[in-house]
Image: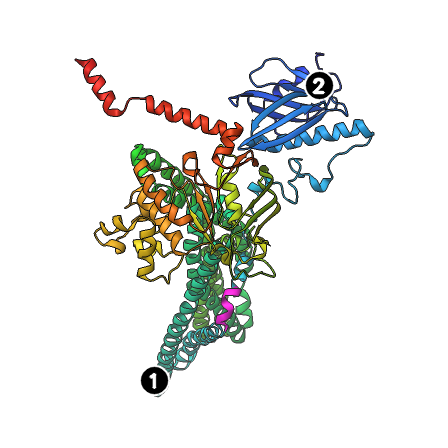
């Protein structure tokens, strides 16, 4: 291999091991187009290697090897990309034989796609003399990786893209405030009248000073009737301001609570309409924080801070009008600090907004730790990981403290500065007012009233500056909530729904394809299931069995092809209406906190006690339920922890039986229980499958012997179909699975039991 010169061009940007090792493998003038770090060898063991495409060759250092190999790029070469079950692969072939194969974990998939794309572009250039590079619209402008089909945003780069929160997000809350617009208008009028009432007392101090107190000091007797009139005016204004303030606060607080309740309900309702794909990328604690604390913060903002802000604006506007009417020059001096305060508010607003959004995200991390640890407390204690979880919480709390400190550093400087400017403004008014009194331009009463108004003016101005903080907090919270409301489900409702009055249960899968992100899970799958037929899905882990039933339930929508039930595409059916015909029994049954009866009747809340008992009897759950202290009214605990695994499974079977579905999905229903419990569950399942189209997944192949047909899956495709005896006779994929499982059972049978081991150890000790 020719040694390269130091001037050989290597593309800038992120590089892994290949960036440090490729230099000695390049020829003079050779340009690297793309590179890929490899972390799996042929046996899928973790090790290191790399693959690089240049303008001339494909160069590889296989994982675990020291030497490099290379192939000159020619039109006859092809570089095929594929991925399955978390492992990606690239295969080089020349039409006659495979020349090389490399594997990697899917974390490197964007680099692999970029490398394959550059290889194909170079090969096409050599074949046609024209570059076949991807169009700019098909490539991420940041990392230059090919965009997934139909995508406008790179899935890798978009992870860190966060739309900054804006105060305008608060205006979007109007959709929730619109139903209460008349109450809000009444609240505004009460605010206007209450603010006007609070401005009356300073105005009455002018005649009280100039016509009563100052003349009295000059020897004029006090006119008590006039004094009574002024004092009555002061008392009346105070009482009116109090009553209007109470009515305004109560009305607007009541409205804001209803707006907050509608916001929470709408967000939760929309959240439940989203597909499982959305929940797969979210943390429970984060979603809980958004719907709970964020909506509560917005409610407090609407009921308290926004009300105060409106009062402050009205107070400042009305005070400014009164001040100008009393003395325009003195009013002009009063407004000197305003431009400086406005400039400071603009300066710190963006910093506070971004800071508060970071605080919200960090706080959700704290909630995530709690949401992980508390439901999993049994696992935490079983593995003695209390200190580890405390450390996780401490780190999240520490991060939260650091972000708060940075925000407080800005806020702590802003607030005292505004206060200082208002005090300086008040001092300027004193100086100018005394000068005007000394020149007989105004009276002492006017100056006193002016100073009273000024103190209120600056107090409200200071209060308005403080609302910047709570406004930015509310804006950040509104943005996080609207992130949920703006998300469109990947399983949409049909525009023109088709309604099935009766479902027979015929299922047809035609040219089915599905991808998780960049990873193809189902490819070109075809299968027809007759009404009432029982199908068993078998195959290695990661072969696509659970994904297939998720597609049939329409938890996800297919990427290619179609699924038809009774000849109708399930995408044409209303989602909830379609799922009412499906009964689902999962490997890990989930029970809600409540009674056993409530959990059995979850799919049919209107069920009578007789129907619940009948379903429990059919599920072979009635006997153990009656042994519980309160029978069907016994609490199952959080996630059903008060019951054993087998008991929870039979409750879930009863839940499926009660809705009487035409299509039944069973995903590893007996894999996590002992043999005795499995027999009880199997009896319940025999009752459940009668007369229903059933699709069952099971690792224990013996549990599927009653299936009409077994469908063997591998790498997202169907490789064999037939009954148990037929597939064994073929000695294909199913035969290998069955033999492997039989050998495992035989090996376990040959091992001594725990009691035998103890007896042996006792004999040896003697």
The disc label shown at residue 537, or none: none
Q: Which residues fall within the magenta stretch? A: 174-181
Which residue is outermost to the bottom? 225
Whole-percent x, y for residue 30 in the image: 74, 20
In which quadrant will I find the N terminus?
Answer: top right
Q: Is residue 217 visible?
A: no
Residue shown at 21%/20% (left/top)? 759
Q: Which residue is mark 1?
A: 228
In which quadrant will I find the C terminus?
Answer: top left
Please say if the residues under marks 1 and 2 sit with CB atoms less than 8 Å apart: no
Q: Quadrant of residue 255?
A: bottom left
Q: Which secondary structure, mark 1? A: helix
Whether residue 455 appears in magenta in the rendering, the answer is no
Whole-percent x, y for residue 449 in the image: 44, 73
For marks 1 and 2, the one nearer the N-term is: 2
Q: Quadrant of residue 102?
A: top right
Whether residue 179 appears in magenta in the rendering, the answer is yes
Whole-percent x, y for residue 533 in the image: 49, 47
The disc label shown at residue 71, or none: 2
Q: Is most of the magenta stretch helix, strand or loop?
A: helix
Query: Closest to the observer: 255 or 646?
Result: 646
How busy is the neighbourhood of tag 2: few (under 14 within 10 Å), some, or many (20 plus)? some
- Is residue 493 depicted above or below 53 in this figure? below
How busy is the neighbourhood of tag 1: few (under 14 within 10 Å), some, or many (20 plus)? few
């Amino acid at each position: 291999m020719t040694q390269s010169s130091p001037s050989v061009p290597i593309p800038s940007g992120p590089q892994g091991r290949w960036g440090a090792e490729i230099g000695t493998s390049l020829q003079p003038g050779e340009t690297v187009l793309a590179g890929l770090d490899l972390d799996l060898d042929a046996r899928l063991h973790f090790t290191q290697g790399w693959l690089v495409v240049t303008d001339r060759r494909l160069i590889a250092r296989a994982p675990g090897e020291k030497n490099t190999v290379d192939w000159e790029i020619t039109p006859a070469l092809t570089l095929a990309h594929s991925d399955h079950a978390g492992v990606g692969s690239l295969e080089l072939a020349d039409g006659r034989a495979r020349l090389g194969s490399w594997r990697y974990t899917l974390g490197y998939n964007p680099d692999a796609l970029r490398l394959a794309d550059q290889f194909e572009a170079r090969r096409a250039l050599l074949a046609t003399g024209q570059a076949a590079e991807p169009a700019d619209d098909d490539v991420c402008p940041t990392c230059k990786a090919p965009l997934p089909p139909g995508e406008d945003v790179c899935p890798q780069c978009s992870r860190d893209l966060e739309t900054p929160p804006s105060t305008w997000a608060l205006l979007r809350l109007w959709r929730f405030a619109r139903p209460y617009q008349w109450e809000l208008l009444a609240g505004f009028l009460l605010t206007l009248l209450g603010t006007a009432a609070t401005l009356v007392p300073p105005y009455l101090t002018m005649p009280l000073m100039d016509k009563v107190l100052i003349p009295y000091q000059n020897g004029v007797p006090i006119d008590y009737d006039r004094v009574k009139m002024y004092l009555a005016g002061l008392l009346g204004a105070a009482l009116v301001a109090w009553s209007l303030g109470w009515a305004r606060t109560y009305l607007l607080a009541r409205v804001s609570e209803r707006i907050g309740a509608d916001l929470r309900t709408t967000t939760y309702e929309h959240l439940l309409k989203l597909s499982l794909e959305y929940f797969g990328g979210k943390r429970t604690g984060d979603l809980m924080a958004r719907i709970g604390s964020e909506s509560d913060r917005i409610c407090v903002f609407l009921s308290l801070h926004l009300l105060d802000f409106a009062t402050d604006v009205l107070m400042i506007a009305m005070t400014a009008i009164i001040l100008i009417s009393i003395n325009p020059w003195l009013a002009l001096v009063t407004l000197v600090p305003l431009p400086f305060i406005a400039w400071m508010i603009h300066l710190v607003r963006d910093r506070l907004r971004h800071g508060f959004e970071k605080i919200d995200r960090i706080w959700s991390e704290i909630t995530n730790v709690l949401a992980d640890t508390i439901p999993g407390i049994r696992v935490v204690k079983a593995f003695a990981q209390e200190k580890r979880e405390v450390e996780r919480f401490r780190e999240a709390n520490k991060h939260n403290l650091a972000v708060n400190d940075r925000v407080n550093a800005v806020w702590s400087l802003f607030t005292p500065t505004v206060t200082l400017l208002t005090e300086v403004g008040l001092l300027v008014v004193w100086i100018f007012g005394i000068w005007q009194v000394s020149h007989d331009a105004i009276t002492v009463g006017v100056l006193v009233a002016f100073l009273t108004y000024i103190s209120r003016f600056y107090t409200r101005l200071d209060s308005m500056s403080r609302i910047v903080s709570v406004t930015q907090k509310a804006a950040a919270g509104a943005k996080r909530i609207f992130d949920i409301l703006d998300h469109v489900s990947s399983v949409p409702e049909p525009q023109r729904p088709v309604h099935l009055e009766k479902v027979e249960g015929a299922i047809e899968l035609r040219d089915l394809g599905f991808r998780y992100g960049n990873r193809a899970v189902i490819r070109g799958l075809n299968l027809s299931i007759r009404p009432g037929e029982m199908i068993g899905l078998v195959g290695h882990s990661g072969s696509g069995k659970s994904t297939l039933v998720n597609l049939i339930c329409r938890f996800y929508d297919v990427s290619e092809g179609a699924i038809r039930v009774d000849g109708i595409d399930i995408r044409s059916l209303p989602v909830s209406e379609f799922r009412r015909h499906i009964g689902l029994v999962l490997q890990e049954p989930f029970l809600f906190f409540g009674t056993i009866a409530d959990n059995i009747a979850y799919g049919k809340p209107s069920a009578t006690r007789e129907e619940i008992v009948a379903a429990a009897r059919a599920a072979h759950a009635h006997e153990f339920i009656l042994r519980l202290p309160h029978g069907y009214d016994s609490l199952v605990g959080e996630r059903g922890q008060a019951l054993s695994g087998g008991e929870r499974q039979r409750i879930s079977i009863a839940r499926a039986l009660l809705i009487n579905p035409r299509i039944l999905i069973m995903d590893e229903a007996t894999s996590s229980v002992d043999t005795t419990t499995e027999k009880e569950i199997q009896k319940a399942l025999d009752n459940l499958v009668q007369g229903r189209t059933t699709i069952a997944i099971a690792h224990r192949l013996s549990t599927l012997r009653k299936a009409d047909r077994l469908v063997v899956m591998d790498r997202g495709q169907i490789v064999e179909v037939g009954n148990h005896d037929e597939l064994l006779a073929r000695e294909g994929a199913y035969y290998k699975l069955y033999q492997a499982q039989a050998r495992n059972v035989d090996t376990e049978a040959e091992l001594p039991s725990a009691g035998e081991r103890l007896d042996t150890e006792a004999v040896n000790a003697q």
